[in-house]
Amino acid sequence: MTRPESIAMQSTAFLEPNEIIRDVLIVEPDPDRQTELSRVLALPGRRIVGTSSADGAYSLVHAHRPDAIFVAPGLETVSSLKLCADLRHLCPESLIVCIQDEDDSAPLYEIAPYDLQLSYGEIAVLPIGTLEHLRLSRKGVPA
């Protein structure tokens, strides 16, 4: 998997969001972390919706497909990996980020139902434009 430190984003092409990543869904059971993620990912023109459950995520994606989805660990009814797989099936063009705890030493998967696995700390320091770059570089997603 690509790590954020290996993504060179020197271009100013993504200083303002456009249609590439306009809608973001955050699936995070902890309300404080959900608020912090929303704050970190906020850009002018970007809509961020949060939910604390897998059921909420399913309902939200059935109503509107987001451009990017962040799935946190610790959900009550389903594992984050299973939710990522379900969301990949429901939203094949969405960028899916599986969040891992900083102390989680789980291996990165070669073939996974998500595009990127990041810790909370890594998400907090993503350069502007990284998500847009990653979504554009995915196979099968129109540029």
Image (cartoon, helix red, strand yellow):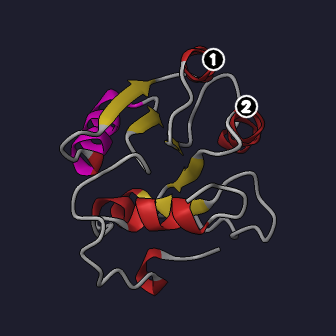
- Can you say whether 17 is above or below 72 in the image? below
Amino acid at pointer 2? Leu
Tell me if mark 2 has few (under 14), some (14-19) or many (20+) residues whose alpha carbon lies within 10 angstroms of its own. some
Mark 1 element type: helix
Q: Mark 2 points at which residue?
A: 90
Q: Which residue lies furthest to the right in this view?
A: 111
Quadrant position of the N terminus in the picture: bottom right
| Magenta-highlighted residues | 30-40
Circles 1, 2 touching at the beta carbon (< 8 Å): yes
Q: Does the magenta stretch include residue 37?
A: yes
- For the point 50% across and 42% down, which residue is it? 67
Closer to the chain start, of discs 1 and 2, is: 1
Left or right: 61, with 40 as reference point: right
Instruction: Give the x, y percent position of residue 127.
Output: 29, 70
Mark 2 element type: helix
Left or right: 88, with 135 as reference point: right
Kindly report the distance in space between the C-alpha atoms of the residues bearing marks 1 and 2: 8 Å
Q: Which residue lies furthest to the front in this view?
A: 143
Tell me if mark 1 has few (under 14), some (14-19) or many (20+) residues whose alpha carbon lies within 10 angstroms of its own. few
Instruction: Give the x, y percent position of residue 133.
Output: 46, 67
Q: Mark 1 points at which residue?
A: 62
